[in-house]
Amino acid sequence: MTDAEKLTLLQKLTGETDTALLSACLSMAGRKVLNKAYPFDDTITEVPDKYGMVQVTIADYIYSKRGATGETVHKENGIDRTYESADVPPSMLKEVIPYCGGIKSADA
């Protein structure tokens, strides 16, 4: 899934037309995915294709939380909101499998 396809999908999910805002959400979501998938390698900057939908889903979550960042409980007119955590919920990243490499010898 290309970045343009992710942006188009996120636009359809949110109804938002501000592409700069949605791109920022996708970028933040991509960083979350990469931090989980490659916890010890900061050199990888592209989200693997198999995690494209996870990135879009997390970007939608980030977009939806705007104005309510860190909210743990909110009750108003019969609507109750509680977030799993102040960050992206761990359940959204459960599909992302951390990559682990082997120990490299000094001779290699």
Image (cartoon, rainbow, N blue to C red):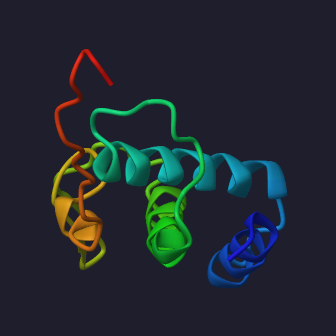
Q: What number of labels is visible?
A: 0
Q: Is residue 93 visible?
A: yes
- As rendered, which of 31 and 84 lies closer to the eye? 31
**Residue at image coords 52%, 64%:** 48
**Residue at image coords 74%, 71%:** 2
Answer with the quarter of the image where residue 76 lies.
bottom left
Whole-percent x and y of residue 29? 49, 53
Whole-percent x and y of residue 89? 23, 59
**Residue at image coords 27%, 64%:** 93
Q: Is residue 81 left or right of residue 32?
A: left
Query: Is 102 placed above or below 60 here?
Result: above
Q: Is residue 19 left or right of residue 47?
A: right
Q: Is residue 68 visible?
A: no
- As rendered, which of 87 and 95 lies closer to the eye? 95
- As rendered, which of 8 and 2 lies closer to the eye? 2
Q: Residue furthest top?
A: 106
Whole-percent x and y of residue 6? 69, 72
